[in-house]
C-alpha cells in the first residue's frame, strides 16, 4: 500500500540539515513510501543537492514561505503564519494529499495548528501525546505526555481507549493491557481524579490492569499507561534527564585516567550494545492521537536517524489506519452510552 | 552536642537484621550519637548478640510489643497498634527522650502516626516528604514526594519555605535557590495550581528561580524543587525504575559471553566508580518536614549501609534544630501576613 507523508522540512533545531537526509534515508528503507518536503524551495533544493538519491520519484517539494520559530507563542503562529511549513504540511493531510504529517518543530504550535486544521475526532475533547518507553522486556506506550493538564476522569478514559487502539493496531496485540499511573501510599492512594478514572476504567471493556506506580513503568508489565499530561511530561523528561546524567557519569569515569580509557576500549563493544538498547532515537516520534489525521511530533533536537524513526512511526499508523480505527470505536461507544439517540 | 535518636527497630522489609547492624555502624562512625532500639526486646537482643560493639553505653533497648505490617492500612495501625515499635519510637520524640525517629516501616502508617502524635507546626497544613536526588554537580532536594496529593498553591509555598530552610540548615547554603516543577509546552504552561503558586513564590522572600522541567531535575541548577506529591512521587519512582533497568541492561550485556565477561573484569574499577556515584543508599533517608519533631523515613528495602545513611540524615537535622528553625520562620511569616493580630 502506497503511503504519502508530509514533512515539516523547516522544523526542529537543525531544520533541513536533519529533515532532508532523514527523509532520504526513510525513502531508501521503505519502498512504498512517498514524501512531500514542505518548506522554502530554494533552501530545500540546496540541501537536497548535497545528498545522493535526492532525485527520487517518490519525493517532491511543496513551497511554504514561512517558518514557525521554536519558541514562538502557538497562538501567534496559528494566526500569523498561515503559509508556514508546519501549517502547509498539515493542510496536505486535511486535503487528503498526504496521510500523515511529521514535524520536529514547536510542540505547542503543532498541537494548536493540528487541532485547528484537522479537528478532534467525534467524542474526543482534546488530543493526547503518546509515545513508547523502553522497558526491561520491550516497551510500553504512555499518554498523555503533555498535551493536556488537569484532565478529567472522562478524558483519562478517552486516553485509555485511544492508547489501547493504537497499541492494538501498531503492535498487533489482541487486547492490550492498560493501567492507570498512581502513587502508592495507602491512605492517600491517588488523587480524586485518578480514583474516579479507576471506576470508569473498571466499568469499560478495556483490558484494565489497575494502578501502576512510577517504578513499574520500566518493568514491562502492561502495554499502555494512562496519566494526566502534567504527570506524564514530568515522568518522560525526568527519565530523559536521568539517562543523560548516567551517560555523562559513565563518560567521566571511563575517561578519567589512562587506565580507565584502556578499560573503556576493552569494554567498547559492550558499552555500544548498552547504548543501542537505550538509544533515545529509536523511541523518537510521539503521536498526537484523537485528531482527524495522523500527526507525529519528532524531538526538536533529534538527528537524521531519529527523524527517520519518526517517519517510520507515521507510516505504521497510516498502514494501520489509526484515526479511522479510533473514530469507529468512539462512534460505537457513543451509540452504547446514548441508546436513545 | 549529644544527640539521641529513636529507631523503629522492627520496621522495614528486613527488620532487626538491617536496623540493628545499621545502628551499630552509626554508633561507630558518630561518637556523639545515642540510639534507642525500639521493639521486641528478645528479638533485638538476639540480633545484637550476633554483632561486635553491641555492648555500647550509647545504645539501649525500649520494649514495644507490636509491629506494624508493611501493608497494613495506616488507620488500622494508628487505632489498633498503640504499642508498636513505630508508635513507641515516635512517642519518645514527643516526650523529649529522643530528638528524632528513623523508621524503614510502612510509609502511610508512619505519616499518620507521626502527624497524630507530634502534630504539624503552626501554619503548616500537612507535612511533606523531602529527600535529596543526585545531580550532575551534587544534589537537589525535592518535595513533596507523596505525603500529599492535590496540594493548593498556598501549600506549595509552605513546601518551598520548608525546603529552603532544610537545605539552608543542613547544607549551610545562605539563600537556597528554589524552583517550581512544571511542564513546558507554551500554551498550556502549567496547570492552574502551579501558575498561582508561581505568583505566591514571586511575592515571597524566597530566592526563587522560576519553573524547571523534569529533565532539569538532574542538572543541578537549583537547590530545592517544589511539586505536588503525586508528581514528585512519580518522578522519584520513575527515576528509581529507570536506574534499575539501566543497571540490569549493563549486567545483561556484560555477562552475555566470555568476551564481555572479560571486558567487565577490565572495566570493573570503573563500573564500581559509576555504581558508587549512583548508589541509592547514599540518598536514603527522606524527611517528613512540617512536624513538631524530626521524622526520617528510610526505604523499606534498604540494607545496613542505607539505614546508617538514614540515621545520619536524622542526626544532621537534630544538630541543625530543623523543626525549631521552620517553626520560628513560620511564626514570623504569620506575624507579617496578619499584622493586626
Image (spheres, coloured by chain):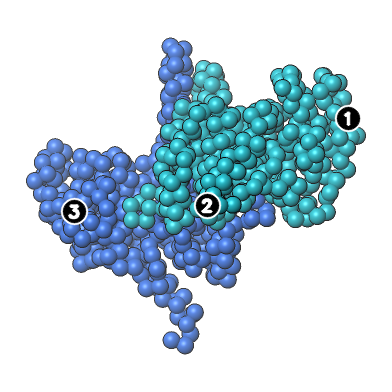
Chain colours: A blue, B cyan
How packed is label 3: few (under 14 Cα within 10 Å), some, or many (20 or more)?
A: many
Badge 1 and badge 2 in a common chain: yes
For mark 3, name the chain: A
Residue assigned mark 3: A85
Residue under the point 63% across and 44% down: B290
Nearest the viewer among A188 and B32 is B32
Residue assigned mark 1: B45
Residue under the point 54% across and 31% down: B168
Q: Check contact, mark 2 vs mark 3: CB within 8 A.
A: no
| SS at mark 3 in the image | helix
Nearest-to-viewer mark from 2 and 3: 2
Whether residue B134 is visible here, answered yes or no, is no
Give the residue furthest to the right: B42
Q: Where is residue B237 in the image (x, y as percent from the top left)?
A: 56, 44
Q: Where is residue A258 in the image (x, y as percent from the top left)?
A: 43, 11
| SS at mark 2 in the image | helix
Q: Position of residue B191 (x, y in %)?
A: 43, 56
Residue assigned mark 2: B154
Nearest-to-viewer mark from 1 and 2: 2
How packed is label 2: few (under 14 Cα within 10 Å), some, or many (20 or more)?
A: some
Residue under the point 34% across and 65% down: A291
For mark 2, name the chain: B
Image quadrant occupied by the N terminus of chain A: bottom left
For mark 1, name the chain: B
Q: Is A188 situated above or below A162?
A: above
Q: Residue A52 carries which label?
A: none
Amino acid at each position: 500500500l502506497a503511503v504519502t507523508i508530509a514533512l515539516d522540512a523547516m522544523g526542529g533545531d537543525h531544520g533541513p540539515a536533519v529533515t532532508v537526509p532523514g527523509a532520504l534515508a526513510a525513502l531508501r528503507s521503505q519502498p512504498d513510501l512517498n514524501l512531500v518536503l514542505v518548506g522554502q524551495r530554494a533552501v530545500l533544493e540546496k540541501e537536497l543537492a548535497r545528498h545522493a538519491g535526492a532525485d527520487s520519484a517518490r519525493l517532491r517539494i511543496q513551497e511554504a514561505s514561512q517558518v514557525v520559530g521554536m519558541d514562538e507563542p502557538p497562538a501567534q503562529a496559528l494566526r500569523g503564519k498561515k503559509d508556514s511549513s508546519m501549517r502547509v504540511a498539515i493542510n496536505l493531510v486535511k486535503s487528503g494529499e498526504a496521510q500523515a504529517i511529521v514535524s520536529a518543530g514547536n510542540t505547542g504550535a503543532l498541537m494548536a495548528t493540528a487541532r485547528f486544521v484537522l479537528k478532534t475526532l467525534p467524542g474526543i475533547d482534546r488530543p493526547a501525546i503518546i509515545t513508547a518507553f523502553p522497558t526491561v522486556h520491550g516497551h510500553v506506550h504512555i499518554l498523555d505526555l503533555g498535551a493536556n493538564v488537569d484532565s478529567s476522569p472522562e478524558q483519562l478514559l478517552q486516553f485509555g481507549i485511544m492508547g489501547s487502539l493504537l497499541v492494538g493496531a501498531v503492535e498487533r496485540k489482541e487486547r492490550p493491557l492498560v493501567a492507570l499511573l498512581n502513587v502508592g501510599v495507602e491512605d492517600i492512594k491517588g488523587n480524586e481524579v485518578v480514583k474516579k478514572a479507576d471506576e470508569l476504567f473498571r466499568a469499560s471493556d478495556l483490558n484494565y490492569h489497575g494502578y501502576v506506580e512510577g517504578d513499574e513503568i520500566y518493568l514491562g508489565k502492561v502495554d499502555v499507561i494512562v496519566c494526566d499530561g502534567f504527570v506524564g511530561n514530568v515522568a518522560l523528561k525526568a527519565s530523559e534527564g536521568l539517562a543523560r546524567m548516567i551517560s555523562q557519569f559513565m563518560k567521566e569515569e571511563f575517561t578519567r585516567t589512562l587506565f580507565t580509557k584502556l578499560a573503556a576500549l576493552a569494554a567498547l563493544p559492550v558499552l555500544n550494545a548498552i547504548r543501542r538498547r537505550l538509544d533515545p532515537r529509536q523511541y523518537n516520534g510521539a503521536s498526537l492521537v484523537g485528531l482527524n489525521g495522523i500527526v507525529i511530533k519528532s524531538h526538536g533536537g533529534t538527528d537524521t536517524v531519529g527523524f527517520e524513526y519518526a517517519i517510520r512511526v507515521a507510516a505504521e499508523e497510516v498502514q494501520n489506519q489509526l484515526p479511522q480505527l479510533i473514530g469507529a470505536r468512539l462512534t460505537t461507544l457513543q451509540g452504547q452510552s446514548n441508546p436513545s439517540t
